[in-house]
Image (spheres, rainbow, N blue to C red):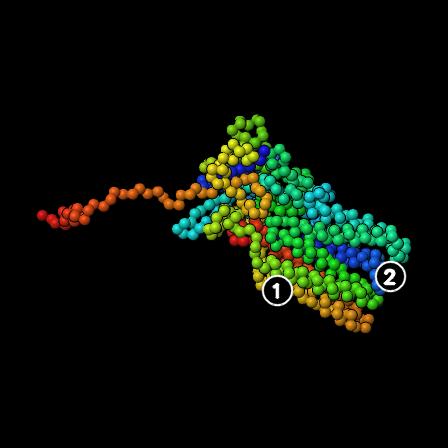
Amino acid sequence: MKLGLVIDTDTCVGCHACVVACKQWNTSGTLGPLTDYQPYGKEPSGVAFNRVRTYEVDTYPNNKTINMPMSCMHCETADCVTVCPTGASFKRAEDGIVLVDQDKCMGCNLCAWACPYGARELDEAVGTMKKCTLCVDRIYDEQLPEAERQPACVITCPTSARTFGDLDDPDSQVSRLVRERNGYQSMPELGYNPVNHYLPPRHKPHAETTPGASLPSLTERFKSWLDKAVVR
Amino acid sequence: MHPALSVIFFTVVSGAGFGLVILTAGLGVLGGVPGLGATGILTALLVGVVLATAGLMASTLHLANPRNAWRAFFRFRTSWLSREAVFSVLFYPCVALYMFGLWRTDGAHGIGMSLVGLLVLLLALATVFATGMIYASLRTIPQWNSPLVPTNYLLLSLASGAVLLTGLTVAFGEPPAVAATLALVLLVTAAMAKAVYYFWIGKPQGPTINTAVGPTRARIKILESGQSSDSFLNREFSYEAAAERILRLRLVVYLCAFLLPFVLLVLLLGTDGAALSLALALVAPVLLMVGLLAERWLFFAEARHVVNLFYGRQQC
Protein backbone atom coordinates (compact mmCIF):
# COMPACT_ATOMS: atom_id res chain seq x y z
CA MET A 1 0.00 0.00 0.00
CA LYS A 2 1.11 3.53 -0.82
CA LEU A 3 -1.23 5.80 1.08
CA GLY A 4 -1.19 9.43 0.05
CA LEU A 5 -3.09 12.50 -1.07
CA VAL A 6 -4.08 13.82 -4.48
CA ILE A 7 -4.66 17.58 -4.41
CA ASP A 8 -6.56 19.39 -7.14
CA THR A 9 -5.06 22.84 -7.73
CA ASP A 10 -7.99 23.59 -10.05
CA THR A 11 -10.60 23.45 -7.32
CA CYS A 12 -8.55 24.53 -4.30
CA VAL A 13 -9.61 28.05 -3.36
CA GLY A 14 -6.90 28.60 -0.75
CA CYS A 15 -9.28 28.92 2.21
CA HIS A 16 -6.80 27.33 4.68
CA ALA A 17 -9.57 25.18 6.20
CA CYS A 18 -7.27 22.12 5.83
CA VAL A 19 -4.51 23.98 7.70
CA VAL A 20 -6.84 24.72 10.60
CA ALA A 21 -8.37 21.23 10.66
CA CYS A 22 -4.90 19.65 10.57
CA LYS A 23 -3.66 21.76 13.43
CA GLN A 24 -6.81 21.17 15.46
CA TRP A 25 -6.68 17.38 15.06
CA ASN A 26 -2.96 16.86 15.40
CA THR A 27 -2.16 19.21 18.25
CA SER A 28 -3.88 16.66 20.47
CA GLY A 29 -2.91 13.68 18.30
CA THR A 30 -0.06 11.16 18.44
CA LEU A 31 2.62 13.72 17.55
CA GLY A 32 1.11 16.62 19.45
CA PRO A 33 1.27 19.22 20.74
CA LEU A 34 1.99 21.48 17.77
CA THR A 35 3.49 24.30 19.80
CA ASP A 36 2.62 27.92 19.05
CA TYR A 37 5.25 30.57 19.70
CA GLN A 38 3.91 33.91 20.99
CA PRO A 39 0.33 33.16 19.87
CA TYR A 40 -0.84 36.55 21.11
CA GLY A 41 2.42 38.41 20.46
CA LYS A 42 3.50 40.64 17.59
CA GLU A 43 4.81 37.79 15.42
CA PRO A 44 2.82 34.66 16.13
CA SER A 45 4.20 31.48 14.58
CA GLY A 46 4.25 27.80 15.35
CA VAL A 47 4.54 24.23 14.18
CA ALA A 48 2.29 23.23 11.29
CA PHE A 49 2.04 19.99 9.29
CA ASN A 50 0.22 21.59 6.42
CA ARG A 51 0.76 24.98 4.79
CA VAL A 52 -1.01 26.58 1.82
CA ARG A 53 0.88 28.98 -0.43
CA THR A 54 -0.51 30.97 -3.34
CA TYR A 55 1.23 31.59 -6.66
CA GLU A 56 0.60 33.49 -9.85
CA VAL A 57 1.45 31.40 -12.91
CA ASP A 58 2.23 33.11 -16.24
CA THR A 59 1.66 36.78 -17.05
CA TYR A 60 -1.41 38.85 -18.01
CA PRO A 61 -3.67 38.05 -19.88
CA ASN A 62 -2.83 34.35 -19.40
CA ASN A 63 -2.13 34.57 -15.67
CA LYS A 64 -3.76 32.23 -13.21
CA THR A 65 -3.75 32.00 -9.44
CA ILE A 66 -2.81 28.62 -8.01
CA ASN A 67 -3.09 27.53 -4.40
CA MET A 68 -0.68 24.82 -3.37
CA PRO A 69 -1.32 23.06 -0.06
CA MET A 70 1.78 21.20 1.09
CA SER A 71 2.21 18.53 3.71
CA CYS A 72 4.44 15.46 3.91
CA MET A 73 4.58 13.69 0.52
CA HIS A 74 5.40 10.32 2.19
CA CYS A 75 8.11 9.85 -0.47
CA GLU A 76 9.03 6.39 -1.69
CA THR A 77 12.72 7.34 -1.50
CA ALA A 78 12.51 9.21 1.77
CA ASP A 79 15.97 10.68 2.45
CA CYS A 80 14.68 12.07 5.75
CA VAL A 81 14.59 8.46 6.98
CA THR A 82 18.02 7.41 5.70
CA VAL A 83 19.84 10.45 7.15
CA CYS A 84 18.29 10.03 10.61
CA PRO A 85 21.11 8.95 12.98
CA THR A 86 18.87 7.74 15.81
CA GLY A 87 16.28 5.70 13.93
CA ALA A 88 13.53 8.04 15.14
CA SER A 89 12.39 8.65 11.55
CA PHE A 90 10.88 5.62 9.88
CA LYS A 91 8.71 4.66 6.93
CA ARG A 92 6.07 2.03 7.60
CA ALA A 93 6.42 -0.99 5.36
CA GLU A 94 2.69 -1.75 5.31
CA ASP A 95 1.32 1.60 4.10
CA GLY A 96 4.33 3.83 3.38
CA ILE A 97 3.51 6.45 6.02
CA VAL A 98 6.61 8.32 7.25
CA LEU A 99 6.59 8.98 10.99
CA VAL A 100 8.89 10.27 13.74
CA ASP A 101 9.25 8.37 17.00
CA GLN A 102 9.12 11.25 19.49
CA ASP A 103 10.86 9.16 22.17
CA LYS A 104 13.97 8.63 20.00
CA CYS A 105 14.38 12.00 18.23
CA MET A 106 17.36 14.10 19.39
CA GLY A 107 16.41 17.22 17.42
CA CYS A 108 19.47 17.44 15.15
CA ASN A 109 17.43 18.90 12.23
CA LEU A 110 19.19 16.74 9.63
CA CYS A 111 15.92 15.21 8.39
CA ALA A 112 14.45 18.69 7.88
CA TRP A 113 17.56 19.56 5.86
CA ALA A 114 17.06 16.43 3.76
CA CYS A 115 13.39 17.18 3.00
CA PRO A 116 12.87 19.20 -0.20
CA TYR A 117 9.23 19.96 0.60
CA GLY A 118 9.56 21.65 4.01
CA ALA A 119 7.38 18.95 5.55
CA ARG A 120 9.35 18.66 8.78
CA GLU A 121 9.38 21.33 11.44
CA LEU A 122 11.27 21.31 14.72
CA ASP A 123 9.13 21.94 17.77
CA GLU A 124 11.45 24.32 19.59
CA ALA A 125 9.56 23.95 22.87
CA VAL A 126 9.61 20.13 22.93
CA GLY A 127 12.93 19.70 21.09
CA THR A 128 11.79 17.06 18.64
CA MET A 129 10.94 16.95 14.95
CA LYS A 130 7.26 16.99 13.99
CA LYS A 131 5.57 16.15 10.72
CA CYS A 132 2.34 15.11 9.00
CA THR A 133 1.20 11.64 10.08
CA LEU A 134 -1.43 11.33 7.33
CA CYS A 135 -3.71 11.23 10.40
CA VAL A 136 -2.57 7.71 11.19
CA ASP A 137 -4.67 8.01 14.37
CA ARG A 138 -7.83 8.62 12.31
CA ILE A 139 -7.57 6.45 9.23
CA TYR A 140 -7.26 3.20 11.22
CA ASP A 141 -9.64 4.14 14.04
CA GLU A 142 -12.43 1.56 14.02
CA GLN A 143 -14.44 3.61 16.52
CA LEU A 144 -15.07 6.14 13.77
CA PRO A 145 -17.73 5.59 11.07
CA GLU A 146 -16.03 4.28 7.95
CA ALA A 147 -16.62 7.47 5.94
CA GLU A 148 -14.69 9.46 8.55
CA ARG A 149 -11.59 7.26 8.48
CA GLN A 150 -9.76 9.86 6.40
CA PRO A 151 -7.20 12.56 7.20
CA ALA A 152 -8.68 15.66 8.85
CA CYS A 153 -7.61 17.89 5.95
CA VAL A 154 -9.47 15.71 3.43
CA ILE A 155 -12.71 15.56 5.41
CA THR A 156 -12.81 19.28 6.02
CA CYS A 157 -12.04 20.52 2.48
CA PRO A 158 -15.15 22.48 1.37
CA THR A 159 -14.36 22.13 -2.35
CA SER A 160 -13.30 18.48 -2.20
CA ALA A 161 -9.93 19.43 -3.64
CA ARG A 162 -8.20 16.76 -1.57
CA THR A 163 -8.55 13.01 -2.09
CA PHE A 164 -7.02 10.32 0.10
CA GLY A 165 -6.29 6.79 -0.99
CA ASP A 166 -3.91 4.04 -2.04
CA LEU A 167 -1.75 5.13 -4.97
CA ASP A 168 -0.44 1.58 -5.34
CA ASP A 169 -3.88 0.35 -6.42
CA PRO A 170 -4.43 1.27 -10.10
CA ASP A 171 -8.22 1.18 -9.66
CA SER A 172 -8.42 3.49 -6.63
CA GLN A 173 -9.97 6.92 -7.02
CA VAL A 174 -6.63 8.65 -6.41
CA SER A 175 -4.86 6.59 -9.08
CA ARG A 176 -7.66 7.27 -11.55
CA LEU A 177 -7.52 11.00 -10.87
CA VAL A 178 -3.76 11.05 -11.41
CA ARG A 179 -4.18 9.12 -14.67
CA GLU A 180 -7.10 11.08 -16.08
CA ARG A 181 -6.08 14.57 -15.01
CA ASN A 182 -2.30 14.30 -15.65
CA GLY A 183 -1.39 14.39 -11.97
CA TYR A 184 2.20 15.50 -11.32
CA GLN A 185 4.77 15.34 -8.54
CA SER A 186 6.65 18.32 -7.15
CA MET A 187 10.36 18.38 -8.06
CA PRO A 188 10.46 14.87 -9.57
CA GLU A 189 14.06 15.52 -10.73
CA LEU A 190 15.37 15.18 -7.17
CA GLY A 191 14.37 11.52 -7.23
CA TYR A 192 12.47 11.38 -3.92
CA ASN A 193 9.45 9.96 -5.76
CA PRO A 194 6.79 11.67 -3.61
CA VAL A 195 3.55 9.70 -3.24
CA ASN A 196 1.33 12.80 -3.07
CA HIS A 197 0.32 14.13 -6.47
CA TYR A 198 -1.10 17.46 -7.66
CA LEU A 199 -3.69 17.87 -10.39
CA PRO A 200 -3.00 20.80 -12.75
CA PRO A 201 -5.69 23.36 -13.61
CA ARG A 202 -8.14 22.10 -16.25
CA HIS A 203 -7.35 23.48 -19.69
CA LYS A 204 -10.00 26.18 -20.04
CA PRO A 205 -8.08 29.35 -20.83
CA HIS A 206 -11.06 31.64 -21.71
CA ALA A 207 -14.73 31.97 -20.77
CA GLU A 208 -17.02 30.16 -23.20
CA THR A 209 -18.93 32.43 -25.66
CA THR A 210 -21.88 31.70 -28.01
CA PRO A 211 -21.74 33.28 -31.44
CA GLY A 212 -24.49 35.93 -31.94
CA ALA A 213 -26.89 36.10 -34.96
CA SER A 214 -25.26 37.24 -38.22
CA LEU A 215 -25.64 40.87 -39.27
CA PRO A 216 -28.57 41.85 -41.58
CA SER A 217 -27.70 43.06 -45.06
CA LEU A 218 -26.59 46.63 -45.78
CA THR A 219 -29.97 47.59 -47.37
CA GLU A 220 -31.88 46.28 -44.33
CA ARG A 221 -29.63 48.19 -41.95
CA PHE A 222 -29.98 51.40 -44.07
CA LYS A 223 -33.79 51.05 -44.02
CA SER A 224 -33.92 50.60 -40.22
CA TRP A 225 -31.62 53.61 -39.77
CA LEU A 226 -33.84 55.62 -42.08
CA ASP A 227 -36.92 54.60 -40.07
CA LYS A 228 -35.33 55.87 -36.89
CA ALA A 229 -33.80 59.02 -38.39
CA VAL A 230 -36.76 60.43 -40.33
CA VAL A 231 -39.41 61.79 -38.06
CA ARG A 232 -42.80 62.52 -39.57
CA MET B 1 21.10 27.93 5.31
CA HIS B 2 21.27 29.46 8.75
CA PRO B 3 24.93 29.43 9.88
CA ALA B 4 24.83 27.84 13.36
CA LEU B 5 27.88 28.90 15.39
CA SER B 6 28.15 25.57 17.25
CA VAL B 7 28.43 23.64 13.98
CA ILE B 8 30.89 26.15 12.48
CA PHE B 9 33.12 25.91 15.57
CA PHE B 10 32.79 22.11 15.63
CA THR B 11 33.78 21.49 12.00
CA VAL B 12 36.71 23.93 12.03
CA VAL B 13 38.22 23.01 15.41
CA SER B 14 37.70 19.26 15.35
CA GLY B 15 38.81 19.25 11.68
CA ALA B 16 42.11 20.85 12.72
CA GLY B 17 42.47 18.44 15.65
CA PHE B 18 41.85 15.36 13.52
CA GLY B 19 44.16 16.76 10.83
CA LEU B 20 46.95 17.14 13.39
CA VAL B 21 46.44 13.55 14.59
CA ILE B 22 46.33 12.21 11.00
CA LEU B 23 49.65 13.86 10.07
CA THR B 24 51.38 13.01 13.35
CA ALA B 25 50.32 9.37 13.28
CA GLY B 26 51.04 9.15 9.54
CA LEU B 27 54.56 10.56 9.88
CA GLY B 28 55.04 8.42 13.00
CA VAL B 29 54.23 5.24 11.10
CA LEU B 30 56.57 6.34 8.29
CA GLY B 31 59.45 6.57 10.78
CA GLY B 32 58.80 9.43 13.19
CA VAL B 33 57.93 13.12 12.85
CA PRO B 34 61.17 14.81 11.72
CA GLY B 35 62.44 17.06 14.49
CA LEU B 36 60.01 15.85 17.15
CA GLY B 37 60.95 13.29 19.80
CA ALA B 38 58.55 11.04 21.67
CA THR B 39 57.48 13.91 23.96
CA GLY B 40 56.84 16.14 20.96
CA ILE B 41 54.75 13.51 19.20
CA LEU B 42 52.76 12.85 22.35
CA THR B 43 52.13 16.58 22.79
CA ALA B 44 51.00 16.89 19.16
CA LEU B 45 48.60 13.96 19.57
CA LEU B 46 47.29 15.39 22.83
CA VAL B 47 46.66 18.82 21.26
CA GLY B 48 44.88 17.10 18.38
CA VAL B 49 42.68 15.05 20.68
CA VAL B 50 41.82 18.08 22.84
CA LEU B 51 40.82 20.12 19.77
CA ALA B 52 38.77 17.24 18.33
CA THR B 53 37.01 16.76 21.67
CA ALA B 54 36.26 20.47 22.08
CA GLY B 55 34.70 20.45 18.62
CA LEU B 56 32.66 17.31 19.24
CA MET B 57 31.36 18.72 22.52
CA ALA B 58 30.32 21.92 20.74
CA SER B 59 28.46 19.89 18.13
CA THR B 60 26.04 18.58 20.75
CA LEU B 61 25.05 22.20 21.53
CA HIS B 62 22.93 22.44 18.37
CA LEU B 63 20.79 19.46 19.37
CA ALA B 64 17.31 20.43 20.49
CA ASN B 65 16.95 17.27 22.56
CA PRO B 66 20.48 16.18 23.66
CA ARG B 67 19.05 13.60 26.08
CA ASN B 68 18.67 11.27 23.09
CA ALA B 69 22.16 11.95 21.67
CA TRP B 70 23.32 8.46 22.70
CA ARG B 71 20.91 6.99 20.16
CA ALA B 72 22.95 8.56 17.32
CA PHE B 73 25.18 5.45 17.10
CA PHE B 74 22.47 3.12 15.86
CA ARG B 75 21.92 3.95 12.19
CA PHE B 76 25.45 3.30 10.93
CA ARG B 77 24.11 1.48 7.88
CA THR B 78 22.39 4.51 6.31
CA SER B 79 23.20 7.76 8.12
CA TRP B 80 26.45 9.70 7.68
CA LEU B 81 25.79 11.52 10.95
CA SER B 82 25.63 8.16 12.70
CA ARG B 83 28.83 7.05 10.94
CA GLU B 84 30.58 10.25 12.06
CA ALA B 85 29.51 9.57 15.64
CA VAL B 86 30.69 5.93 15.53
CA PHE B 87 34.06 6.74 13.89
CA SER B 88 34.74 9.57 16.33
CA VAL B 89 33.96 7.39 19.35
CA LEU B 90 36.04 4.43 18.07
CA PHE B 91 38.88 6.92 17.55
CA TYR B 92 39.34 7.53 21.29
CA PRO B 93 40.38 4.05 22.56
CA CYS B 94 42.66 3.65 19.53
CA VAL B 95 44.42 6.98 20.01
CA ALA B 96 44.70 6.31 23.76
CA LEU B 97 46.33 2.93 23.04
CA TYR B 98 48.65 4.56 20.51
CA MET B 99 49.71 7.28 22.94
CA PHE B 100 50.23 4.72 25.72
CA GLY B 101 52.39 2.67 23.34
CA LEU B 102 54.43 5.72 22.33
CA TRP B 103 55.01 6.53 25.97
CA ARG B 104 56.09 2.94 26.76
CA THR B 105 58.35 2.43 23.71
CA ASP B 106 59.63 6.02 23.67
CA GLY B 107 58.42 6.61 20.14
CA ALA B 108 59.66 3.40 18.53
CA HIS B 109 57.28 1.92 15.92
CA GLY B 110 57.25 -1.87 15.81
CA ILE B 111 54.69 -3.78 13.77
CA GLY B 112 52.05 -3.53 16.50
CA MET B 113 52.54 0.20 16.99
CA SER B 114 52.46 0.81 13.24
CA LEU B 115 49.16 -1.05 12.98
CA VAL B 116 47.62 0.96 15.84
CA GLY B 117 48.97 4.19 14.33
CA LEU B 118 47.45 3.26 10.98
CA LEU B 119 44.12 2.53 12.66
CA VAL B 120 44.17 5.94 14.41
CA LEU B 121 44.95 7.61 11.09
CA LEU B 122 42.16 5.79 9.25
CA LEU B 123 39.55 6.50 11.94
CA ALA B 124 40.43 10.21 12.05
CA LEU B 125 40.27 10.37 8.23
CA ALA B 126 36.94 8.53 8.25
CA THR B 127 35.49 10.96 10.81
CA VAL B 128 36.42 14.03 8.75
CA PHE B 129 35.16 12.36 5.56
CA ALA B 130 31.87 11.50 7.28
CA THR B 131 31.48 15.12 8.39
CA GLY B 132 31.83 16.22 4.77
CA MET B 133 29.44 13.51 3.59
CA ILE B 134 26.70 14.65 6.00
CA TYR B 135 26.47 17.77 3.85
CA ALA B 136 27.36 16.22 0.49
CA SER B 137 24.63 13.58 0.79
CA LEU B 138 21.82 16.17 0.87
CA ARG B 139 20.19 16.34 -2.56
CA THR B 140 18.11 19.28 -1.32
CA ILE B 141 21.07 21.68 -1.28
CA PRO B 142 22.75 21.85 -4.72
CA GLN B 143 25.74 23.80 -3.32
CA TRP B 144 26.55 20.91 -0.97
CA ASN B 145 25.58 17.92 -3.07
CA SER B 146 29.03 17.55 -4.61
CA PRO B 147 32.19 15.46 -4.15
CA LEU B 148 34.00 18.80 -3.78
CA VAL B 149 32.51 19.16 -0.29
CA PRO B 150 34.17 16.14 1.41
CA THR B 151 37.32 16.95 -0.61
CA ASN B 152 37.36 20.45 0.90
CA TYR B 153 36.69 19.14 4.40
CA LEU B 154 39.57 16.64 4.14
CA LEU B 155 42.04 19.07 2.57
CA LEU B 156 41.27 21.90 5.01
CA SER B 157 41.53 19.50 7.93
CA LEU B 158 44.92 18.24 6.73
CA ALA B 159 46.20 21.75 5.91
CA SER B 160 45.22 23.13 9.32
CA GLY B 161 46.74 20.04 10.99
CA ALA B 162 50.01 20.60 9.10
CA VAL B 163 50.19 24.28 10.08
CA LEU B 164 49.56 23.31 13.72
CA LEU B 165 52.26 20.63 13.52
CA THR B 166 54.70 23.23 12.17
CA GLY B 167 53.87 25.53 15.08
CA LEU B 168 54.41 22.72 17.59
CA THR B 169 57.74 21.71 16.01
CA VAL B 170 59.01 25.28 16.26
CA ALA B 171 57.68 25.55 19.84
CA PHE B 172 59.83 22.53 20.72
CA GLY B 173 62.82 24.41 19.26
CA GLU B 174 63.35 22.02 16.36
CA PRO B 175 63.86 22.76 12.65
CA PRO B 176 60.39 22.65 11.03
CA ALA B 177 61.53 21.98 7.43
CA VAL B 178 59.47 18.83 6.78
CA ALA B 179 56.28 19.93 8.57
CA ALA B 180 56.39 23.40 7.00
CA THR B 181 56.95 22.01 3.49
CA LEU B 182 54.05 19.62 4.01
CA ALA B 183 51.90 22.52 5.20
CA LEU B 184 52.82 24.61 2.13
CA VAL B 185 51.86 21.80 -0.26
CA LEU B 186 48.57 21.17 1.57
CA LEU B 187 47.71 24.89 1.76
CA VAL B 188 48.17 25.27 -2.01
CA THR B 189 46.12 22.12 -2.72
CA ALA B 190 43.33 23.15 -0.34
CA ALA B 191 43.25 26.69 -1.80
CA MET B 192 42.89 25.30 -5.31
CA ALA B 193 40.09 22.93 -4.28
CA LYS B 194 38.28 25.78 -2.51
CA ALA B 195 38.66 28.03 -5.55
CA VAL B 196 37.18 25.30 -7.76
CA TYR B 197 34.27 25.00 -5.30
CA TYR B 198 33.59 28.76 -5.34
CA PHE B 199 33.71 28.73 -9.14
CA TRP B 200 31.37 25.73 -9.27
CA ILE B 201 28.67 27.22 -7.01
CA GLY B 202 28.83 30.59 -8.77
CA LYS B 203 26.02 29.77 -11.17
CA PRO B 204 22.70 28.44 -9.81
CA GLN B 205 22.06 25.07 -11.43
CA GLY B 206 19.61 23.43 -9.02
CA PRO B 207 15.85 22.86 -9.34
CA THR B 208 13.63 25.79 -10.33
CA ILE B 209 10.30 27.11 -9.06
CA ASN B 210 8.75 25.71 -12.24
CA THR B 211 9.26 22.06 -11.30
CA ALA B 212 8.57 22.79 -7.62
CA VAL B 213 5.15 24.41 -8.01
CA GLY B 214 3.93 22.95 -11.26
CA PRO B 215 5.24 21.46 -14.48
CA THR B 216 5.05 24.63 -16.54
CA ARG B 217 7.52 26.79 -18.40
CA ALA B 218 5.51 29.90 -17.59
CA ARG B 219 6.79 32.47 -15.12
CA ILE B 220 5.72 31.71 -11.53
CA LYS B 221 5.80 34.14 -8.63
CA ILE B 222 4.58 33.85 -5.07
CA LEU B 223 1.54 35.93 -4.10
CA GLU B 224 0.95 34.75 -0.56
CA SER B 225 3.13 32.61 1.72
CA GLY B 226 0.13 31.77 3.90
CA GLN B 227 1.83 32.87 7.12
CA SER B 228 2.03 36.24 8.86
CA SER B 229 5.54 35.75 10.28
CA ASP B 230 8.56 33.52 9.75
CA SER B 231 8.21 29.84 10.56
CA PHE B 232 10.89 27.25 11.39
CA LEU B 233 11.39 26.75 7.65
CA ASN B 234 12.27 30.42 7.06
CA ARG B 235 14.48 30.66 10.12
CA GLU B 236 16.41 27.51 9.20
CA PHE B 237 16.59 27.70 5.40
CA SER B 238 15.95 31.24 4.17
CA TYR B 239 19.11 32.87 5.51
CA GLU B 240 20.56 35.10 2.85
CA ALA B 241 23.78 37.09 3.09
CA ALA B 242 24.34 40.27 1.05
CA ALA B 243 26.46 39.69 -2.06
CA GLU B 244 28.92 42.35 -0.92
CA ARG B 245 29.40 40.64 2.44
CA ILE B 246 29.98 37.29 0.74
CA LEU B 247 32.61 38.84 -1.51
CA ARG B 248 34.36 40.47 1.44
CA LEU B 249 34.36 37.23 3.44
CA ARG B 250 35.73 35.27 0.47
CA LEU B 251 38.61 37.74 0.46
CA VAL B 252 39.13 37.00 4.17
CA VAL B 253 39.14 33.27 3.35
CA TYR B 254 41.73 33.59 0.59
CA LEU B 255 43.93 35.93 2.65
CA CYS B 256 43.72 34.48 6.18
CA ALA B 257 43.25 30.81 5.40
CA PHE B 258 45.63 30.45 2.49
CA LEU B 259 47.79 33.37 1.35
CA LEU B 260 49.05 34.80 4.67
CA PRO B 261 49.82 31.41 6.32
CA PHE B 262 51.61 30.45 3.08
CA VAL B 263 53.76 33.62 3.17
CA LEU B 264 54.45 33.22 6.91
CA LEU B 265 55.57 29.61 6.43
CA VAL B 266 57.83 30.57 3.49
CA LEU B 267 59.41 33.25 5.72
CA LEU B 268 59.74 30.66 8.50
CA LEU B 269 61.66 28.32 6.20
CA GLY B 270 64.06 31.15 5.34
CA THR B 271 64.73 32.48 8.82
CA ASP B 272 67.25 31.39 11.48
CA GLY B 273 66.23 33.58 14.43
CA ALA B 274 64.49 31.58 17.16
CA ALA B 275 62.19 34.41 18.33
CA LEU B 276 61.09 35.32 14.80
CA SER B 277 60.51 31.65 13.97
CA LEU B 278 58.32 31.21 17.02
CA ALA B 279 56.30 34.34 16.22
CA LEU B 280 55.79 33.24 12.60
CA ALA B 281 54.90 29.68 13.57
CA LEU B 282 52.31 30.79 16.13
CA VAL B 283 50.67 33.56 14.10
CA ALA B 284 50.12 31.26 11.10
CA PRO B 285 47.69 28.83 12.85
CA VAL B 286 45.76 31.73 14.44
CA LEU B 287 45.27 33.42 11.05
CA LEU B 288 44.34 30.08 9.52
CA MET B 289 41.64 29.50 12.16
CA VAL B 290 40.15 32.96 11.51
CA GLY B 291 40.14 32.24 7.78
CA LEU B 292 38.56 28.82 8.25
CA LEU B 293 35.82 30.19 10.52
CA ALA B 294 34.94 32.65 7.73
CA GLU B 295 35.14 29.80 5.20
CA ARG B 296 32.74 27.63 7.23
CA TRP B 297 30.33 30.53 7.81
CA LEU B 298 30.22 31.07 4.04
CA PHE B 299 29.72 27.33 3.47
CA PHE B 300 26.40 27.63 5.29
CA ALA B 301 25.40 31.15 4.22
CA GLU B 302 25.88 30.39 0.52
CA ALA B 303 23.93 27.11 0.60
CA ARG B 304 20.45 27.48 -0.88
CA HIS B 305 17.91 24.86 0.22
CA VAL B 306 15.24 23.98 -2.37
CA VAL B 307 12.41 24.71 0.10
CA ASN B 308 13.07 28.37 -0.73
CA LEU B 309 11.52 27.70 -4.14
CA PHE B 310 8.13 27.40 -2.42
CA TYR B 311 8.73 30.83 -0.87
CA GLY B 312 9.32 32.43 -4.26
CA ARG B 313 13.00 31.90 -5.11
CA GLN B 314 13.31 31.19 -8.84
CA GLN B 315 16.24 28.77 -8.73
CA CYS B 316 18.49 27.19 -6.10
Write down the residue under mark 1: B248
SS assignment at label 1: helix
Q: Are marks 2 and 1 on the same chain?
A: yes
Front-most of residues B183 and B237 = B183
Name which residue lies at 66% across and 45% down: A83
- Going by the numbered disc 2, the residue's amino acid type is Gly
Which circle's residue, 2 or 1, is located before the other in the chain?
2
- For disc 1, the chain is B
Q: Position of residue B257 (x, y in %)?
A: 69, 63
Residue most extreme to the right: B105
Compared with residue B255, is residue B131 higher up or lower down, i.e. above or below?
Answer: above
Q: Position of residue A213 (x, y in %)?
A: 25, 42
Image quarter for residue B65?
top right
Image quarter for residue A125?
top right
Distance Cα–Cα, label 2 vs label 1: 42 Å
Front-most of residues A119 and A218 = A218
Write down the residue under mark 2: B37
Res. A156 visible in picture: no
- For disc 2, the chain is B
Name which residue lies at 61% across and 54% down: B143
Res. B269 visible in picture: yes
Determine whether, in the image, residue B98 is placed left or right of residue A171.
right
- Going by the numbered disc 1, the residue's amino acid type is Arg
